[in-house]
Amino acid sequence: MSKWSETTDKVGELLKKSIVTFGDKTIHVYDVFIALFIVVSTYLILRWVRKLLQAGQKANKLTIGQQFAYYQLAKYVIVVVALVSILKTFKVDLSILIIGSSAVLVALALGLQHLFNDLVSGFFLLFEGTIRVGDIIEVDGMVCRVQEIGIRISKVKKRDGISLVIPNGKIISNSVINWTTDSSITRFTVDVGVAYGSDVQKVRDVLLDCASRHNEVVRSPKPICRFIAFGESSLNFELLFWSKNRFRIEDVQSDLRFMINAEFTKNSIRIPFPQRDIHIKTSTDSSAHIPDTVG
């Protein structure tokens, strides 16, 4: 029993042994052990949180984006709490630290406001789930597929295969069209003008036939042809069709225009070019007064 007491006394003395002294504050060996305990505990808690969120994602209770956002938020909170605890363990006066760094924080906030905006926007995107990985979106007239949504930036791929990095703040602050909806098909159009005097019923039949023969045009709903306007030099039609190929729809529209042009040529339907009639009025008054010259 005496040996055990002697051992514990020695351990107690070792833990109380001072390492560093500054002013009236002293860091002991046990302070270092407490800090190490906080670090290990933080690591284990983060692992547990990650596994918990992964289980929620596998059970379809969370999306991948929500899982990532929840983990990042939990990580920041847990790490901040751990850092504060370690600083208190080492007897650091946090009030003085905050006051001393306030000016620096204000300067950083002003200089990095766009960065903070992107970070906050990233959390909104991930939490709300309005835009997800794999969605086809249109930003500033650019159609692209979302490859990755991060905290600060999102990675997208354009239809020409070029990958881009877009700040999340730009996605939140701009009007974004999400072409990926609950419906698996989307409506698109092809505009066509034909010459005056053309058989409009024949034009209608040709447009609908071309749409019905294209593999990327769905059969239901059926394509629709509208006679939309009497133009300055043409009769204007609009071909409406539905397709699943949102990402490459320009290719489908191009194919339809090739088919329509070929059928118009076969059926002698002309596509006019802009033209104007110019009427010139000439003066019939041939009388003119020619003054006499004085020699």
Image: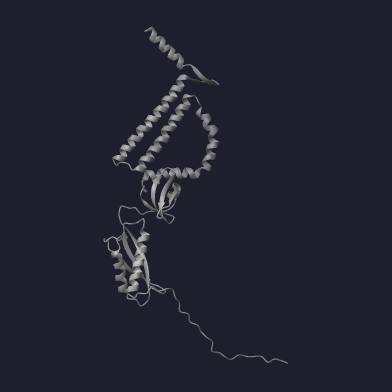
Residue at (47% x, 19% y) in the render: 29
Q: In which quarter of the image is the N terminus?
A: top left
Q: In this view, does 107 lie to the left or right of 176?
A: right
Residue at (28% x, 64% y) in the render: 213
Instruction: Find residue 138 and report its horizontal and vertical position in percent.
Output: 40, 54
Instruction: Find residue 23 and report its horizontal and vertical position in percent.
Output: 55, 21
How many marks do you count on the picture? 0
Toward the viewer: 129 or 10? 10
Residue at (34% x, 72% y) in the render: 264
Q: Quadrant of residue 196?
A: bottom left
Toward the viewer: 174 or 237? 237
Tell me, what colour scheme is on the image? one colour
The relative height of residue 173 versus residue 83 in the rendered view (above or below) is: below
The relative height of residue 229 versus residue 184 in the rendered view (above or below) is: below
Q: Quadrant of the C terminus?
A: bottom right
Residue at (42% x, 47% y) in the render: 155
- Residue at the limit of the structure toward the top, as seen here: 2
Q: In which quarter of the image is residue 82?
A: top left
Instruction: Find residue 236 and report its horizontal and vertical position in percent.
Output: 37, 71
Toward the viewer: 210 or 76? 210
- Residue at the limit of the structure toward the right, as seen here: 295
The relative height of residue 67 versus residue 4 in the rendered view (above or below) is: below
Instruction: Find residue 170 and report its horizontal and vertical position in percent.
Output: 45, 49
The relative height of residue 217 versus residue 204 in the rendered view (above or below) is: above
- Residue at the limit of the structure toward the left, as seen here: 220
Q: In this view, does 137 lie to the left or right of 60?
A: right
